[in-house]
Image (cartoon, grey):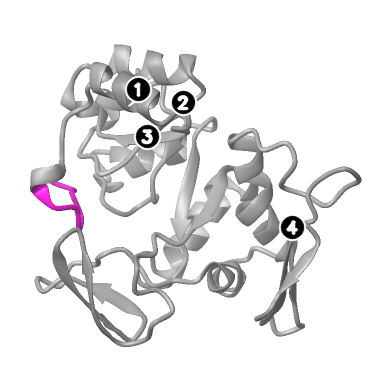
């Protein structure tokens, strides 16, 4: 619970394989990714069930040390840098573990608030475009401008493109995905091909979405059109244009 972020404490539970089995059945086997803190025990059976059922094991909201993580079978890190034991000179933590393990894919919230540009660039240099995925971590106030909102029963104030609890902690984001796509190119040395890799190709590969991820014959015609300044002009889903 050290890195619970904006999650209400009363809803946080330790990894529980039997409960996961129940939820997996109730979801009609649609659960595809689970975030958990591996330092909290019961992990071998928990990870084994996920891997057997095509669920991505993702470390997040975790205070685990590198020593606690070296035997983890997790292949993914939930919002790299945020809500996790940080990289330090005597303890790599969750962030350092993600940087050291080539097989791990990490998420980035590229809004400039959750992660400063230099740290986005560091992750990009170490992990590369093929092992990073852009996410928004957006909550319900995304797109509504400044004002008061709610997250898990907690008051959230949105101001200057930041969502925060009364204690000042970030409460998710109000980042739009097209802005994440643009920001990663502004904040790092990533080019547009890298941004496409991190915003589409990697996710389709990791989740086994064979009809998504690139434009080729027989695949879904899902794509966006940007102008030269990287402003979103149009969105197409299954070949149908949606108004901007």
Q: Between disc 1 and disc 2, whose residue precedes?
A: 2
Q: What whole-number distance in Å separates the C-alpha atoms at marks 3 and 2?
A: 13 Å
**Viewer-nearest of labels 3 and 4?**
4
| Rendered residue at 65%/42% (across/down) | 204
Q: What whole-number distance in Å separates the C-alpha atoms at marks 1 and 4?
A: 38 Å
Residue 7 image point, x, y percent: 19, 53
Q: Can you tell which mark lies on residue 34?
A: 3
Marks counted in the figure total 4
| Residue receiving disc 2 | 29
Q: What whole-number distance in Å separates the C-alpha atoms at marks 1 and 2?
A: 29 Å
Q: Between disc 3 and disc 2, whose residue precedes?
A: 2
| Residue receiving disc 4 | 222
| Residue receiving disc 1 | 70
> Could you classify mark 3 by the number of other residues whose Cα lies within 10 Å: few (under 14), some (14-19), or many (20 or more)?
some
Q: Is residue 193 above or below residue 67?
A: below
Residue 34 image point, x, y percent: 37, 34
- The magenta region covers 1-9
Could you say which quadrant of the image residue 58 lies in? top left
């Amino acid at each position: 619970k050290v890195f619970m972020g904006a999650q209400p404490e009363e809803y946080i539970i330790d990894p529980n394989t039997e409960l996961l089995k129940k939820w997996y059945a109730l979801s009609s086997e649609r659960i595809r990714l689970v975030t958990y803190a591996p330092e909290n025990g019961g992990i071998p059976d928990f990870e084994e069930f996920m891997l057997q059922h095509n669920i991505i094991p993702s470390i997040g909201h975790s205070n685990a040390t590198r020593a606690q993580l070296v035997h983890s079978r997790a292949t993914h890190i939930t919002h790299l840098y945020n809500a996790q034991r940080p990289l330090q000179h005597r303890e790599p933590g969750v962030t350092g573990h993600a940087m050291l393990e080539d097989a791990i894919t990490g998420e980035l919230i590229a809004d400039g608030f959750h992660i400063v540009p230099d740290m986005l660039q560091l992750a990009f240099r170490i992990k590369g475009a093929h092992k990073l995925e852009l996410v928004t971590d957006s909550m319900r106030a995304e797109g509504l401008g400044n004002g008061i909102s709610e997250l898990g029963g907690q008051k959230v104030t949105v101001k200057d493109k930041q969502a925060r609890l009364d204690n000042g902690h970030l409460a998710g984001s109000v980042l739009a995905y097209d802005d994440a796509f643009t920001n990663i190119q502004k904040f790092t040395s990533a080019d547009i091909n890298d941004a496409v890799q991190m915003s589409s190709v990697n996710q389709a590969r990791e989740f086994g979405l064979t009809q998504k991820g690139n434009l080729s014959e027989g695949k879904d015609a899902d794509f966006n059109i940007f102008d030269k300044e990287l402003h979103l002009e149009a969105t197409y889903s299954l070949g149908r244009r949606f108004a901007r």
